[in-house]
Amino acid sequence: MPRPSQIDEQRKKLLPIVCQTFSELGYRRTTTAELAQRCEVRENILYRLWPDKKAMFLAAIDDIFQSRADKWEQILIDLPSPESRVERLIAYEAEHQGEFGFYRVIFTALAETDDNEMRTALIRMYRQFHKLVSQQIATGRESDRDRLTVNDAAWGLIGLATISNVIVELNLLGPRQRNQMFASVAQALVRDMV
Amino acid sequence: MPRPSQIDEQRKKLLPIVCQTFSELGYRRTTTAELAQRCEVRENILYRLWPDKKAMFLAAIDDIFQSRADKWEQILIDLPSPESRVERLIAYEAEHQGEFGFYRVIFTALAETDDNEMRTALIRMYRQFHKLVSQQIATGRESDRDRLTVNDAAWGLIGLATISNVIVELNLLGPRQRNQMFASVAQALVRDMV
DNA sequence: ATATTTTGTAAGCTACCGCTTACTTTATCA
DNA sequence: TGATAAAGTAAGCGGTAGCTTACAAAATAT
């Protein structure tokens, strides 16, 4: 007799706006008032869709990763040859880095890793991400090419240092594994310079 | 006739505690009350040392980077041969990643890049950091070694993606340069796999 | 039509944040 | 010793955050 709930539909409808807001402002600076305003609803309506602000943020993390993965699939849909897939992904990522504020969300999440839900959401995301990347580069191997400049290698090392910190923070690898990984990648980069 | 000001000394004395707190909690979660408590002074005393909370944070960024650079210098002090320097640094960093919460601070700062002071502090820091790394790897070149596993290469790529986002966020490189850098490093990593 | 539940509106509550003010005590140097 | 400014104490102010409550409007199934 009652009217049927449309909570799921509303959640799905508002989630992109929530993602966008967190991507711009990060976790702490995003207020529930701001979210409500951008979604063009009142705050209490958001609180009927998610139990609290953190749940909204966690939903955003999952969604942002998922759409990224979907994008990759879409890009690779007509490229069956394994060799060209990696090259295609590299080209795409090189072009579109930072376009969706994905890492803004990740960075602010990383400041909240003493919260357990936040932590597990991040761990899950990084594991999935790493698996995805591994699968892709496992299939297609590259032919040779020019070598690295010192400048490029330095950026590579700083990126490596960054992700290493994330790995420590989230315990994605044990100390020995991480240590070896760091040394291997660092040496590969240094070794590859012109 | 008055008593001499010891503001500089106090600043220097409290800065490590301030750094430690920001490293644990990040920017937004660190309250001035918390800072005061850890420093074992009242809040208004902190406000006599720095104009506002942001200034405390900026001071922390500078100090954290500086102590990192000092550490490197100290490590290399008795290693004049260029070849061993890089290897030594790689070994050190592999071992001590994430030990000082440096990237916690950086991550939270990255959520505030629409603030101009925050932005310039980060840009300066990354430029110095990159310069430091470049100088080191420019001097010592490596002999050959084993090659990368798929897993290690995947982490390297994720690190590269991360730093690329930072580069976009802070405009550390132009789009074309960044694009090329990304592709070069990514290909070097993929190329190097077993 | 009407009972029932969802949807929407408006207001406000509690807690805390960054920062300030008013004041007392302490240390220095003429 | 005493004038002077620094160092320390205590309280609180304005603003806002996350979240809740109370209530009216709307829509469905009987």
Image (cartoon, coloured by chain):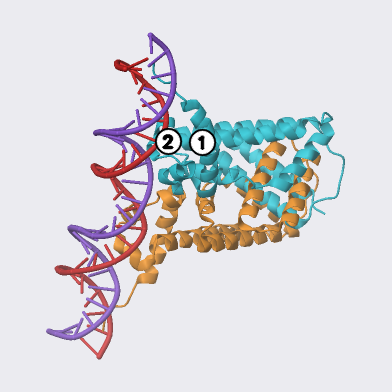
Chain colours: A cyan, B orange, C red, D purple
In this view of the protein, can residue B171 be seen by the observer? yes
- Residue under numbered circle 1: A14
Contact, mark 1 vs mark 2 (Cβ under 8 Å):
yes
- Image quarter (top left, top right, bottom left or bottom right) of the N terminus of chain B: bottom left
Percent x, y of residue B137: 72, 56
* Total numbered labels: 2
Between discs 1 and 2, the one toward the N terminus? 1
Does A140 sit left or right of B68 as displayed?
Answer: right
Q: Does B123 sit above or below residue A137?
A: below
Residue type at mark 2: give it. Answer: Leu
Q: Nearer the viewer, residue B189 or A73?
A: A73
Residue type at mark 1: give it. Answer: Leu
Percent x, y of residue A133: 70, 34
Query: Which quadrant would residue A90 be assigned to in this image?
Result: top right
Q: Chain of mark 2?
A: A
Q: Which mark is residue A46?
A: 2
Query: Which quadrant would residue A154 be assigned to in this image?
Result: bottom right
Percent x, y of residue B141: 77, 54
